[in-house]
Amino acid sequence: MGQISELLQCAPLQPAQAAIAITGVAALDEAGPGDLSILSSPRYLKQFASTAAAAVLVDRAIKVPTPADRTIPLLVDNAEMAMARVLQLIAPPVPQPPAGVDPTARVDPTARLGDAVAVGPFCVVGARSSLGSGTILHAGVFIGDDVAIGRDCRIFPHVVVRERITIGDRVIIHANSVLGTDGFGYRWDGARHAKIPQIGTVIVEDDVEIGSCACIDRAKFGATRVGRGSKIDNLVQIAHNVTVGPHCVITALVGVAGTVKLGAGVAIGGGASIRDGVQLGDGALVAGCAGVATDVAPKTAVSGIPAIAHRQNLRELNALGRLTELLPQINQLLDTLKQPKEK
Amino acid sequence: MGQISELLQCAPLQPAQAAIAITGVAALDEAGPGDLSILSSPRYLKQFASTAAAAVLVDRAIKVPTPADRTIPLLVDNAEMAMARVLQLIAPPVPQPPAGVDPTARVDPTARLGDAVAVGPFCVVGARSSLGSGTILHAGVFIGDDVAIGRDCRIFPHVVVRERITIGDRVIIHANSVLGTDGFGYRWDGARHAKIPQIGTVIVEDDVEIGSCACIDRAKFGATRVGRGSKIDNLVQIAHNVTVGPHCVITALVGVAGTVKLGAGVAIGGGASIRDGVQLGDGALVAGCAGVATDVAPKTAVSGIPAIAHRQNLRELNALGRLTELLPQINQLLDTLKQPKEK
Amino acid sequence: MGQISELLQCAPLQPAQAAIAITGVAALDEAGPGDLSILSSPRYLKQFASTAAAAVLVDRAIKVPTPADRTIPLLVDNAEMAMARVLQLIAPPVPQPPAGVDPTARVDPTARLGDAVAVGPFCVVGARSSLGSGTILHAGVFIGDDVAIGRDCRIFPHVVVRERITIGDRVIIHANSVLGTDGFGYRWDGARHAKIPQIGTVIVEDDVEIGSCACIDRAKFGATRVGRGSKIDNLVQIAHNVTVGPHCVITALVGVAGTVKLGAGVAIGGGASIRDGVQLGDGALVAGCAGVATDVAPKTAVSGIPAIAHRQNLRELNALGRLTELLPQINQLLDTLKQPKEK
C-alpha cells in the first residue's frame, strides 16, 4: 500500500500499514481484505461503514466516521482522479499479437509497415496502405487500399477501415467498428432513390478513441472529420461530412447526421440525435435523449425533443406537471365564464 | 396434423383431419393449404375468414365464425404459447460447424476445450481460455486470453469476447456482438480527456441470450454483470459496471449507462436510455423511447423523457392536448382581466 | 470543365474556360483552384463570394453576385442533382477482390457461383448457397447454408448472412451488418423466458442498400421483408416479421419492432422507434426521434413521443412554451377567484 500512498502523496502511513499488499480494486460492498476501494460520494457512507476493504480512497470533502480497524482511509483531494492514477499503476497489459505479420494475414506487397507493427491473424491490409511504428492490428481487422494509419494505434478485432482513409497517431478503435462506409445519400429520380456517389474520405486525428460497433461514414466529397482527442462511445453514428471538433465526447447510441459541425469540447449524452446541417458551438452540452434540430450556441446546454435551452426545458416540464393539477380548475373557470354569456 | 393436435391437447380430430400433413407455418393471409396459422387477436378475424390455411390455432377467448371447410380451427387456451410449442416441434436445426477445431482456426495450445466443442473456420481462441463441453464457436469468433466459457453455448459468427471474461452455460451470443470493450471513462486533465484504465471484467450468467451488434463493456474495476436468464436484443449498449439482474428483457437500441443496477425481471422497451447510476427495482417496466434519469421503484412503469410514472405521463400528454384547445380562451380571459386594470 | 458543362447541359463555356481541368470536388470554403464546388442554398452566399473554386454549380433560383474572375458559375436547375451526376462521372472505382475464389476462403462444394463472382479472403459460403453473376463478397463475409443471393450484389467486409435467406439483385450490404439473427421472441413459462424458435427467413428484394452494423432479424415464421429499392442506414434494427415496402428510407439508429408494416415510400428520420404491430401507410413520414405507437395514415407526417400528427405536435410544443409564460398569471387568477369564496 506504500506505493499507492506515495503515488497519491497521502499522509504517511505507519510501516505496518504501508506493508499491506493491495491485490485488487473493488466497490465498497464487494471489496475483500486485499482490496482498495473508493468513497467519492456521501451516498455510499453506509457501504463505507461496513466495507471489508484494506483501504479506501476518500474524498477529503466527505466527512467520514472512523472506519473499522481493518480499513485504512486514504484522504485525497479527488478520489475519482486518485483512483484513475492507481488503476494506471496496476492495470494489466492488454494482450496483443506479437510484432510482425501473422502468417495467416493478407498484407498487400505495396503496403508499408513501420517498426514494431503487429498484424494479427486473418487481417487484410490493402494496396499502398501504411501503418506507423508501433501500431497494432488485432485479429481480423480489414484495412482497405490507400489507407494511412499513424503510430501507436490500437485497432481491435474485426474493425473495418475502408479505402482512402487517414488515421492519426495513438488512435484506438474498438472491435467491430466501421470507418468509411458510403454516406447515406440518394436523390429520387422519379422512379427510384438513385445513389449519390460518396467519393470523399474520413480523417481521424491524433488521440481519438472510438468504441465498438460505431460507424463513421465517408464524405460525399471532402472529408468527415473527427478532431484530435475526441472520444466516441459504442454504437455511435457519425454521418457523411460531419466535423467533430477536438476534445468532444459523444456517448453511446448518439446519431450525428450529415454535415453537422461540432465545435471544440462539445459533449453529447447517450441516445441523442443531431439533425443534419446543425452547428454546435464550442463547449455546447447536449443532454441524453435530446433531438437537436437547430444550432446551439457555445457553452449552452440543451435538452428535450426538439432540444431547447435546458433551463427552459425544465421550466416547461415543471409547467406541464402543474397543468395536470390546474386543468380541472381552469376548465371549471372557463365553463363558469361561458354560462352567463349563454343566458 | 394429429401430432400437433396431440401436442397441444386439443379436442380430438377426425381421422381424415389428423392425417393432413402440415408442411409449414404462415400468417393467415399468406398461408397455403399445407400451412398452420394462428389467430391470437380479434383484429385479424377478417383474414381468418378468408385464409387458405389447413388449420389455425385459435385463442379460445375469441369468438370465431365457422371457417370454410378447408380450414380446421384448433382451439387452445393461449394461441401464442401453443404456436411456440409447435415451432419447437418443427424448427429446422441451425447449421453449425462440426465438433472439433477447424484447421484454419487459431487455438492457443494452452486453451482447454471440453467434449464435443466445435471451433469454426477463422476463429481465434486465446491463451488459457476454456470452452465447456458442447460449446460451439461459429466462423470468425474471437475469444481473447483468459476467457472462461461454460457448456453448450452458441457463439455466432464474428463475435468478439475480449480478455478475462466469464460466460456461463447455455449462453447464446449472436453475430458481431462485442463483450469486454473498455468502459467509456476519461478524466479531463486540463489539456485532454485522459483515459481511465478499465481493468475489470464482464460476467454473463447462465441462459443469457445476447443479440447482434450488442456491446457489453468491461468494468472500470469489478465486473459488468448480466444476470441469469436475461435477454438482450440487437444493438444494445451495456456500459461499464452495470448490473443486469436475472430474467431482464432489454429491447433493441437501448442504452444502459455506467453503474446502473437493474433488479430481477426488469423490462426495457426499444430505444430507451438509462442514465448512469440509476437503480431500477425488481419488475420495473420502462416504456420504449423513455429516458430514465432517476431511480424507479419495483414493479413501477415509467415513460417519457425524463421518465416519470407512466400514468402521470399519460395525464400530462392528455393535458397538453387539451391545452392547445383551451389556450385561445385562456389568452382571451387573461386579456379581459388585464384591460379593466389598465383603464 | 467542358465535359462537366456538357453533361449538365449548361450554357456554352468559352474555350479557355472549357479547357480548365477539374481535379476534385470540395465545399465552397475548402475548394482550391482545381475544384468544383456547389451553391444550393442562399445560406452559403458568403462562402460563395470568397471561394477559390474553379467553378461552382449554382441553383438557378439563387440570385448570385458576379463572382471573382477565378470562379465560373455553372447555372443549373437543381444543383444537388447536378452534383450527383458529376460525382457519378468522377467517382473512383471501389477496390474489390478479383473475380474468383480467394484461396483462403471456405466455399462449400455444393455452393453455386455465377460468372465473375468474387469471393474475398477469409469468406465462408455455406452448403447449397448460390451467388449470382457479378456478385462480390469482400473479405471475411459469412454466408450460411441455403442462402440465395442474386446478381451484381456488393457485400462488404464481415457481413453475416445466416442460413436460408434470400437476397435479390444489385443489393449492397455494408460492413459488419447481420441478416437473419433469430427474432427476439420469448414466452415466460413461470420460471424463465423460454425461447420461441424463429424458423422464418429474411427476404431482401432488388436494389436495396443496407448500411453498416444494421440488423435484420429472421421471422418467427414466414419472412421479414425489405422491399425493392429501399435504403436502410447504419445501426438500424429491423425486427422479426417486419415488412418494409418498396422505396422506403430508414435513417440511422431507427428501431422497427416486430410485425410492423411499412407501405411504399415511407421515410423514417434518425433515432425514431416504431412499436410492434404498427402499420404505416404509403408515403408516411416519421420525424427523427419520434416514437410511433399507433398506425399512421398514408402521406401523413408524425413526430413526438408518442408520435402524433406533426402539425399538432408543433401546436403542443408552442402551447407549452406559452404556458411557462402564462402560468404565473393563471395561478394568480385562480388564487384571486378562490379567495372571495373562502371569505
Image: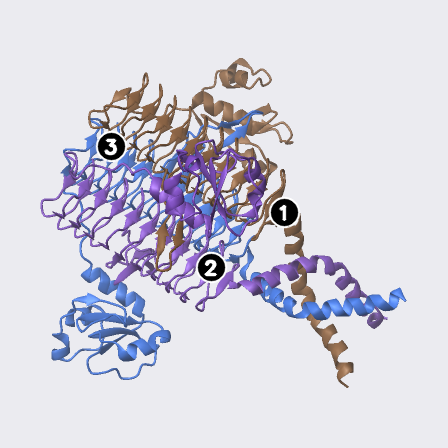
Chain colours: A purple, B brown, C blue
Disc 2 versus disc 3: nearer the observer: 2
Separation of residues labelled 3 and 1 (CA atoms): 48 Å
What numbered label is drawn on residue B310? 1
Looking at this rendering, what residue extends furthest in the front direction?
A15
Classify B203 as above or below A310. above
Q: Residue at x 22, y 26 (%)?
A: C110
**Residue type marked 1:** His
Q: Residues within 10 Å of mark 2 (few under 14, many from 20)?
A: many
Separation of residues labelled 2 and 3 (CA atoms): 45 Å
Nearest to the observer: residue C311 or residue C148? C311
Image quarter (top left, top right, bottom left or bottom right) of the C terminus of chain C: bottom right
Q: Which residue is mark 3?
A: C125
Q: Chain of mark 3?
A: C
Classify B108 as above or below A51. above
Provide residue A233's location: percent of width, then percent of height. 38, 49
Provide residue A237's location: percent of width, then percent of height. 37, 52
Same subunit, labels 1 and 2: the answer reads no
Q: Chain of mark 1?
A: B
Helix, strand or loop at mark 2: strand
